[in-house]
Amino acid sequence: MELGNFERMIQLAEDVFSAHNDPAQLVVDEKVMELLERIHPATLSEHVEGDGPVVWILLIPTTIDLMNRFVVEEISETELLNQTPLDIKYEALYLCSALVLPEFRRKGLATKTGMDAIRHIRADYPIKFLFTWNFSNEGASLAELAAKHESLPLLKRPIHS
């Protein structure tokens, strides 16, 4: 039986991030999705074609202090999200993940979806920094493009092999 787009996106997320095997990574479940929605509706964005999503973008607005602690590896993604206070004016934005099904890559869909989400968040919060933890060259390129387009400094958490 052929998998639908939603199931393929779930599999892609596991293949790319293996979050269940890395305690530093955020495992996105219903509880996490509810918290992200409370922070801002654009934290979880998708582009849908056919029978479901073909692009998923996850952004986490947070504080500059938490951003700095995350970038220097003092806290994990889960701690970043869980320590982010609610109902404040966030000044940092974490580009947590961008996933695109293979046949939809290099069409600008992640860029459009991501930039739309960033603009929605920036309409509500005075974002001064973008930060990332790159797992792929494509993710790094998206972060660089978004930072340049939005005139934001980009901070990066290092990847360890």
Image (cartoon, rainbow, N blue to C red):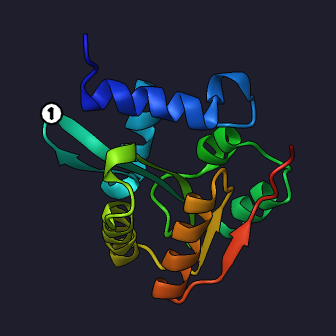
What residue appears at the point 74 percent right and 29 percent down from the top-left corner? 22
Q: Position of residue 95 (x, y in %)?
A: 54, 59
Taking the view exactly as shown, the residue that stands out farthest to the bottom is 151
- Position of residue 25 relative to residue 120, above or below, is above
What residue appears at the point 49 percent right and 52 percent down from the top-left corner? 86
What residue appears at the point 29 percent right and 29 percent down from the top-left corner? 6
- Position of residue 98 relative to residue 143, above or below, is above
Res 92 seen here = no
- Camera-side residue: 161 or 105? 105
- Camera-side residue: 112 or 92? 112
Q: Is residue 139 left or right of residue 53?
A: right
Q: Position of residue 94 (x, y in %)?
A: 58, 60
- Camera-side residue: 64 or 29? 29
- Camera-side residue: 18 or 129? 18
Q: Is residue 26 left or right of residue 43?
A: right
The part of the image, by quadrant, that contains residue 11 is: top left
Res 61 seen here = yes
Q: Position of residue 60 (x, y in %)?
A: 52, 55
Neighbour class for label 1 at 10 Å: few (<14), some, many (≥20)?
few
Quadrant the N terminus occupies? top left
Q: Is residue 116 left or right of residue 135?
A: left
The part of the image, by quadrant, that contains residue 161 is: top right
Which secondary structure lies at badge 1? loop
Count of marks placed on residues? 1
Taking the view exactly as shown, the residue that stands out farthest to the left is 50
Amino acid type of disc 1? Asp
Residue highlighted by disc 1: 51
The part of the image, by quadrant, that contains residue 52 is: top left
